[in-house]
Amino acid sequence: MGKSKLALHNPPGPINEPGMMKILYVDHFPGRITSMCKLDVVVNAIQEKLTRQQLQLFKNNIFGRFLQCQSYPFSGVIVHNILLRQVSHGDGNDKDELWFQVGDHLIRLSIGEWCLVTGLCCGEKVFLTKHKTKHRLLNKYFGGMNCDINLGQFEEIFMNLHFKTMNDTDALKIAMFYFADRVLHGRKDHCQINFNLLNEVDDINHFRSIPWGRLSWETIYKSIDNVLNGKAKKFKKASAENPLHRIEKYNFYGFTSAVHAWIFEAIEGLPLEWVEKIRRNGPRIVRWKPVAFSDINFGEVYSYLNERLDGTILQTLKPDAKERATNYWKSVDDYVPYLPSWVRNHQPSINAPSSIGPNKVDPNPTSEIRLEQSPVEDVGAADDHYESAHDSDDRNEPKARTKFRNDYFVGRLDKIETSIHELRSELQTGHSSINELRSEIMAERREAQQYRAAVMGFMASFGAGASKGAYGDSPFGPSHMAPDGYGPNVDAGYGTHTDAGNDDEHTSMSLYSVYGDISDDSVQIFTEAPPGVSKLGCPYRPSYIFGSPYFIPPFKRVR
């Protein structure tokens, strides 16, 4: 895809070499993000205020799938940890994608990933060339052009509108405007609402044709690529001047909840304490349920992304068969960028983490660097970041960089050697378990063979194929008794059988049996049984051994 105009406003960062982190590991810092996107607030307001008919109209429209995001807290700790890991695009490269290094892996956020996560159309911009109305909705419901309304005030006005008496189509238009301006644009409360957009939504067919995926992508691209510019130096300076300054606060604009969902898709296997995956139909954002951000702290996430990645890391997101058939993917398929050459040749070691850098910011995963803290007080992580950090300019010197890389490789080799020893120990333990299992199987086999021999000998002792009353040389005499517990009525030559399905139903039958011992178990053999009679769902057959019970061929032994 050709270079977009947006790229001119987004410099690649202070380091021009492609793949180099814009903020080096040694300069990483704890951060508190304020998200301007109010996804769950808007969704709950729409569901609360619209009538059933109006809500159904919204569900059937372009933003309807997001109604599943009723509970979608924003975890700024996770997002901040990813933003810290953004790498430079390099001069002259296409700027329609963003890259981040997580552990030893590169992950991409491009318009393709954005489309899969949001499910919004990403085609070319459509402009409204002819206004059918002139601010009709604004004049009818919001006091006209002379009334200043900011986003915070609009939320209050929306909650006070009488939707039950409102035209259903007007209600749909207002709700769609509310979602677009408050969620997709993601701006501060004091910003004025987009009056032009409120006018455009009155032509609802035109409003539906707007490529909201592309517009929201351009907003979030600009936001991500600039949000941390200058923040590392600001944090370092503030920490030096004020020892109590332990966290940097900043705002994050645009559809930030979708960035959240992209992280969950790209980094598989994140702890359940952070996010829960849900089986839902729709774009990928609705398949995730983030955990309240107050339960996640900076140090734990930072350590996890550096050292304990448990799942698969997806460099890019690919559509499945169903997604390929959707209109939103068809709108972006031709615009998804190819992988640049520097990505294929990327060496993760150029961004090796420092052994004395940011990990010292919050060595305790249970520290109190949490987003729920008061915005006035910055308490929590130990403030040894500034004193222990290297000068980032020194890192660019050849000797310093060589030493840094050597230290990194030594650490990595030690870690690999430790892992090899652990694997060797596990394999030895596994071999011991296999040998024990093999011995148990052999013992079971010998026991089965002995049992079979005993059964066959026992059968031969009373004569194979004996008929009623004919036992050959069997040492056991005929028995005219039914098995113990098979019923209270026992007559000469007759027994009673209680069917398992009905304890009160008895079936008289003539049973001849003999007694004996097999493998120290008292057993009883029946040479006849009426067909179709069952016990526990299994039909009786001649040569049923009763006792433990046991079955002889063609049955398997059952204890």
Image: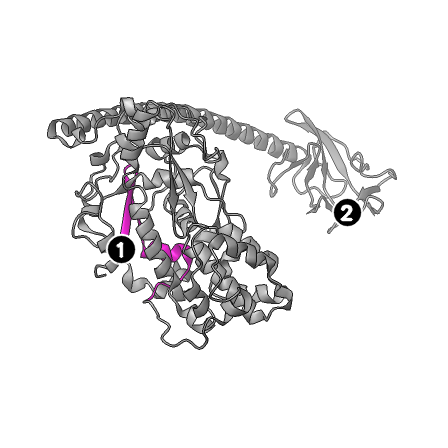
Judging from the image, what secondary structure is the residue with disc 2 in?
A: loop
Query: Residue 389's spot in the image, x, y percent?
Result: 26, 25
Q: Quadrant of residue 328?
A: bottom left
Q: What residue is shown at x 33% (from left), y 63% (from top)?
A: 332
Marks 2/1: CA–CA distance: 71 Å
Horizontal side of residue 59 vs 321, given as left or right: right
Judging from the image, what secondary structure is the residue with disc 1 in?
A: loop
Q: Is residue 103 magenta?
A: yes
Query: Residue 44's spot in the image, x, y percent?
Result: 56, 53
Disc 2 vs disc 1: Cβ atoms closer than 8 Å? no
Badge number at residue 96: 1
- Other-residue count near label 2 (Cα within 10 Å), few / some / many at <14 / 14–19 / ≥20: few
**Magenta-highlighted residues:** 97-123
Horizontal side of residue 375 vs 330, given as left or right: right
Query: Residue 40's spot in the image, x, y percent?
Result: 51, 50
Query: Along the polypeptide, which appears first: circle 2 or circle 1?
Result: 1
Query: Residue 190's spot in the image, x, y percent?
Result: 45, 51
The amino acid on which the numbered mark 1 sits, given as a three-letter code, is Asp
Quarter of the image that includes the N terminus: bottom left
Q: Is residue 204 above or below residue 187?
A: below
Residue 409 visible in image: yes
> Residue reaching furthest front?
146
Viewer-closest of 467 and 501: 501
Badge number at residue 501: 2
Viewer-closest of 68 and 125: 125
Quarter of the image that includes the C terminus: top right
The amino acid on which the numbered mark 2 sits, given as a three-letter code, is Gly
Q: Is residue 348 above or below residue 123?
A: above
> Residue reaching furthest left?
398
Q: What residue is shown at x 64% (from left), y 68% (from top)?
A: 165
Q: What residue is shown at x 41% (from left), y 45% (from top)?
A: 264
Q: Is residue 477 magenta?
A: no
